[in-house]
Amino acid sequence: MIRTKLTVVIPLYNKAKHILDTLESVLNERPKVAEVIVVDDGSSDEGPLLVKHAIATQACYKAVKLIQQRNGGVSKARNTGIRYATGTHIVCLDADDQWLPGFCAEIHTLIHDFPNCRAFATNYYKKHGDNWIEPKIRFPRPIEQNTALHNYFEISSRGDLPFNTGSICLERTLLIEIGGFPENEPMGEDQDVWAKTALKTAIAYSPKRLEVYILDADNRACIHNPPKTECPFSVRLLAAVESGAFDDNDRIHVLRYTATHLLTLAKSLIAAGDYQHARQLLRDPRCKLLALKKWWLMGMLVSRQLQLRA
């Protein structure tokens, strides 16, 4: 059996406020990770200097490597890290998120207990300021112990994703097979990878919440500049459905999954005051599959517009 060797890839772009806390959460884990690859994607703040100084002055940072490149986006940074990784398994942790104690041990347990899986994930928290938020993950049945998820699209079409980017570990060979993270796309590049992963393997899953997704971190692009149209990962899934790539049972779950994406974008656009593009998304026939949420958002949109006219 090949010995598990865990690499953590951290894309860094203007996250000086958070990067050392993120690294500390990784370096404090037991068992220790084999390596941490921080890929500076052309930061203009002091984040890379903080990492360099920590590597030079603190013994616990000996597993950390810093790679610097011109700005090319988060996917390019992750792919650079994957290319340089020497581990058998990879986690792509964002530079403003953190692991909770026990994450590494739980991933190793999943890898050992589910040898037929190629992806391994835990539940997570969202955090906004001092508020810890449990994601609204709607499993068809309660999950109280470690299991293998065979129904990623069904779960994800019901509510929040069952894992966050920093709480899922993939075999390096799997990441290479699926082509890594798609580059030069506005949002949803991580969901592209999870969808491709779900089509290739069941996902070994722990219900323990062992990663923290920081909602109010600096420089969250999806908050400040939401895409105005359906993201490419969703377009590709729709094309796959229309080509007959899914059976009838999976087909409806994948369509609901893409509808969830459309409604999430519409909600962000309404919050940003872009009612025209929000309305266009809500008119997509797939949104009828989630009728209650669609009409709730339509009501929000109309209310906002009436307030402007008052």
Image (cartoon, rainbow, N blue to C red):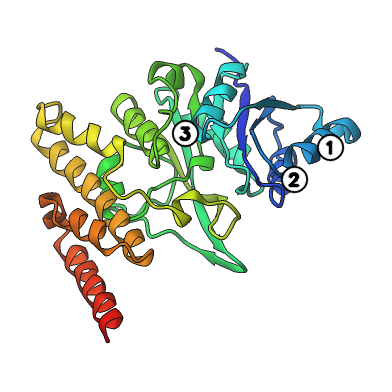
How crowded pointer 3 is (Cα within 10 Å; few <14, some 14-19, many 20+) is rated as: many
Residue at x-position 35% and y-position 34%: 192
Say which quarter of the image contains residue 104: top right
Three-letter amino acid code of the residue under disc 2: Leu
Asked if the residue under mark 1 is in contact with the one under mark 3, i.e. CB atoms within 8 Å, the reply is no
- Is 267 positioned to the left or the right of 97 in the image? left
The disc placed on residue 20 is: 2
Three-letter amino acid code of the residue under disc 3: Phe
- Is 269 positioned to the left or the right of 16 in the image? left
On the image, the x and y values in percent for residue 86 come to 62, 16
Of badges 3 and 1, the one in the foreground is 1
Q: Quadrant of the N terminus?
A: top right
Residue at x-position 71% and y-position 44%: 45
Kindly report the distance in space between the C-alpha atoms of the residues bearing marks 1 and 2: 8 Å
Kindly report the distance in space between the C-alpha atoms of the residues bearing marks 3 and 1: 30 Å
Farthest-out residue, top: 1
How crowded pointer 1 is (Cα within 10 Å; few <14, some 14-19, many 20+) is rated as: some
The disc placed on residue 120 is: 3
Q: Which residue is mark 1?
A: 54
